[in-house]
Image (tube, rainbow, N blue to C red):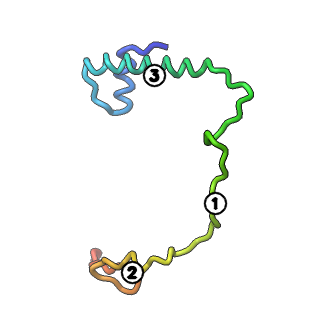
Amino acid sequence: MSVDTATVRRVARLARIAVSDDDAEAMRGELNAILGFVAQLGEVDVEGVEPMTSVTPMAMKKREDRVTDGNKADDIVANAPARDEHFFVVPKVVE
Protein backbone atom coordinates (compact mmCIF):
# COMPACT_ATOMS: atom_id res chain seq x y z
CA MET A 1 0.00 0.00 0.00
CA SER A 2 1.29 3.41 -0.92
CA VAL A 3 0.16 6.63 0.75
CA ASP A 4 -0.29 9.73 -1.41
CA THR A 5 -0.34 13.36 -0.30
CA ALA A 6 -4.16 13.45 -0.33
CA THR A 7 -4.25 10.57 2.16
CA VAL A 8 -1.70 12.35 4.37
CA ARG A 9 -3.87 15.47 4.36
CA ARG A 10 -6.98 13.41 5.20
CA VAL A 11 -5.24 11.65 8.10
CA ALA A 12 -3.91 15.00 9.35
CA ARG A 13 -7.41 16.50 9.19
CA LEU A 14 -8.87 13.52 11.09
CA ALA A 15 -6.12 13.90 13.72
CA ARG A 16 -6.71 17.65 13.82
CA ILE A 17 -3.08 18.38 12.91
CA ALA A 18 -2.11 21.35 10.75
CA VAL A 19 0.24 20.16 7.99
CA SER A 20 2.03 22.39 5.49
CA ASP A 21 2.80 21.29 1.92
CA ASP A 22 6.44 20.54 2.77
CA ASP A 23 5.46 18.62 5.90
CA ALA A 24 2.85 16.61 3.98
CA GLU A 25 5.47 15.42 1.52
CA ALA A 26 7.84 14.43 4.33
CA MET A 27 5.02 12.66 6.18
CA ARG A 28 4.10 10.77 3.03
CA GLY A 29 7.56 9.23 2.95
CA GLU A 30 7.48 8.44 6.66
CA LEU A 31 4.04 6.83 6.49
CA ASN A 32 5.06 4.73 3.49
CA ALA A 33 8.15 3.54 5.40
CA ILE A 34 6.01 2.63 8.43
CA LEU A 35 3.48 0.76 6.29
CA GLY A 36 6.32 -1.05 4.53
CA PHE A 37 7.68 -2.17 7.89
CA VAL A 38 4.22 -3.37 8.99
CA ALA A 39 3.86 -5.31 5.73
CA GLN A 40 7.26 -6.87 6.37
CA LEU A 41 6.11 -7.96 9.85
CA GLY A 42 3.06 -9.58 8.25
CA GLU A 43 5.35 -11.88 6.29
CA VAL A 44 6.87 -13.43 9.43
CA ASP A 45 5.79 -17.03 10.04
CA VAL A 46 4.42 -17.19 13.59
CA GLU A 47 2.68 -20.55 13.28
CA GLY A 48 2.96 -22.40 16.59
CA VAL A 49 4.46 -19.45 18.46
CA GLU A 50 2.75 -18.87 21.80
CA PRO A 51 1.79 -15.28 22.67
CA MET A 52 3.85 -13.84 25.50
CA THR A 53 3.71 -10.86 27.79
CA SER A 54 7.38 -10.86 28.72
CA VAL A 55 10.65 -12.03 27.21
CA THR A 56 11.43 -14.01 30.35
CA PRO A 57 8.84 -16.22 32.03
CA MET A 58 7.68 -14.66 35.27
CA ALA A 59 4.71 -14.73 37.60
CA MET A 60 3.01 -11.45 38.28
CA LYS A 61 2.99 -10.32 41.89
CA LYS A 62 -0.54 -10.19 43.20
CA ARG A 63 -2.05 -8.66 46.29
CA GLU A 64 -5.28 -9.29 48.06
CA ASP A 65 -8.04 -7.20 46.48
CA ARG A 66 -9.64 -5.42 49.42
CA VAL A 67 -10.95 -1.92 49.98
CA THR A 68 -9.17 0.22 52.57
CA ASP A 69 -8.90 3.92 53.31
CA GLY A 70 -5.12 3.67 52.94
CA ASN A 71 -4.56 4.70 56.57
CA LYS A 72 -3.20 8.02 55.28
CA ALA A 73 -6.02 10.43 56.11
CA ASP A 74 -3.83 12.43 58.49
CA ASP A 75 -1.03 12.67 55.90
CA ILE A 76 -3.45 13.79 53.19
CA VAL A 77 -4.90 16.72 55.14
CA ALA A 78 -1.64 17.59 56.93
CA ASN A 79 -0.90 20.64 54.73
CA ALA A 80 -4.49 21.79 54.32
CA PRO A 81 -5.04 25.41 55.40
CA ALA A 82 -8.32 24.42 57.07
CA ARG A 83 -9.59 20.99 58.04
CA ASP A 84 -12.15 19.28 60.21
CA GLU A 85 -10.98 15.84 61.36
CA HIS A 86 -10.05 14.10 58.08
CA PHE A 87 -11.89 16.49 55.76
CA PHE A 88 -10.84 19.62 53.87
CA VAL A 89 -12.74 22.76 54.84
CA VAL A 90 -13.52 24.97 51.86
CA PRO A 91 -15.55 28.17 51.52
CA LYS A 92 -19.19 27.85 50.56
CA VAL A 93 -19.67 28.60 46.85
CA VAL A 94 -23.41 27.91 46.49
CA GLU A 95 -25.93 30.45 47.76
Q: CA distance from mark 2 to mark 1?
A: 32 Å
Within-10-Å neighbours for mark 1: few <14, some 14–19, many 20+: few
Q: Nearer the viewer, residue 85 or 92?
A: 85
Callout 2, which amino acid? Phe
Judge whether 79 appears above or below 42 on screen: below
Local secondary structure at mark 3: helix
Image quadrant containing the C terminus = bottom left
> Label 3 belongs to which residue?
34
Q: CA distance from mark 1 to mark 3?
A: 38 Å
Within-10-Å neighbours for mark 2: few <14, some 14–19, many 20+: few
Q: Nearer the viewer, residue 94 or 35?
A: 35
> Label 1 belongs to which residue?
62
Q: Residue at x 37, y 21 (%)?
A: 8
- 70 relative position to 62: left or right: left
Callout 3, which amino acid? Ile
- 45 relative position to 17: left or right: right
Callout 1, which amino acid? Lys
- If you read the primary sequence from the N terminus, does the residue marked by circle 3 or circle 2 appear first? 3
Q: Quadrant of residue 65?
A: bottom right
x, y percentage for residue 27? 35, 21
Local secondary structure at mark 1: loop
Residue 87's label in the rendered image is 2
Q: Residue at x 42, y 15 (%)?
A: 3
- If you read the primary sequence from the N terminus, does the residue marked by circle 2 or circle 1 appear first? 1
